[in-house]
């Protein structure tokens, strides 16, 4: 399953990621997904304040497969599942040690900074995202 993801991000679990059940909380897992999404977008499109367009999360779906516990490192694998005119779909797998504890799928829409409406992404971005499919 790791081979499905050409792009990787690593994050450290924090004690504050745990909840009263003692496991890493679902909100913290969503934040780990966000870290991976941010890294793959920046790798292709550049830093947010340097790009000509903004981006917005349209949809996210997370499947929680197993509990994980503090401490440890999490590796977030990401792949581009779809490239649209003004959007991308990112598929992710989250791993602690050899365990895939969650998968996610997110849709990111690129928007014009002035109109705040969806806008076609530059061709260079499209080519960059297609390389990560």
Image (cartoon, rainbow, N blue to C red):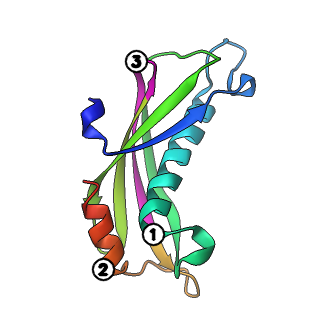
On the picture, is 121 further left or further right than 52? left
- Cα distance, mark 3 to mark 2? 37 Å
Q: Residue at x 57, y 82 (%)?
A: 113
Q: Which residues are magenta?
A: 95-109
96 magenta-colored: yes
> In which quadrant will I find the N terminus?
top left
Q: Judge the density around disc 3: few (<14), some (14-19), many (≥20) Cα neighbours within 10 Å.
A: some
Q: Residue 88, how many percent across, how many down?
A: 35, 62
> Residue lying farthest bottom?
114
C-alpha gap between disc 1 and disc 3:
30 Å
Rendered view: 14 above or below 7? above
Relative vertical location of residue 6 with respect to residue 54 in this rendering, above or below: above
- Mark positioned earlier in the residue sequence (2 or 1): 1
Would you name the residue on which mark 1 appears? 45
For the residues bearing labels 1 and 3, Cβ distance under 8 angstroms:
no
- Residue drawn at (30%, 74%), measured in percent from left and top? 85
Magenta residues, dominant SS class = strand
Q: Secondary structure at mark 2?
A: helix
Q: Residue at x 36, y 51 (%)?
A: 90
Residue 98 painted magenta: yes
Give the CA separation, mark 2 to mark 1: 11 Å
What element does badge 1 sit on?
helix
From the top left corner, tell me how far across and down residue 129 is, in percent. 31, 63
Which of the marked residues, 3 or 2, is nearer the chain's N terminus?
A: 3
Disc 2 target residue: 123
Q: Which residue is mark 3?
A: 99
């Amino acid at each position: 399953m790791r081979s499905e993801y050409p792009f990787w991000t690593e994050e450290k679990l924090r004690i504050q990621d745990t909840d009263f059940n003692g496991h890493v909380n679902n909100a913290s897992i969503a934040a780990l997904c966000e870290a991976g999404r941010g890294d793959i977008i920046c790798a292709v499109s550049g830093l947010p304040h340097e790009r000509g367009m903004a981006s917005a999360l349209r949809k996210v779906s997370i499947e929680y497969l197993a509990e994980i516990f503090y401490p440890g490192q999490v590796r977030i694998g990401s792949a581009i599942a779809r490239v649209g005119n003004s959007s991308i779909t990112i598929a992710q797998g989250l791993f602690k040690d050899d365990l895939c504890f969650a998968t996610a799928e997110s849709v990111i829409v690129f928007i014009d900074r002035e109109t705040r409406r969806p806008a076609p992404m530059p061709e260079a971005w499209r080519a960059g995202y297609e390389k990560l499919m």
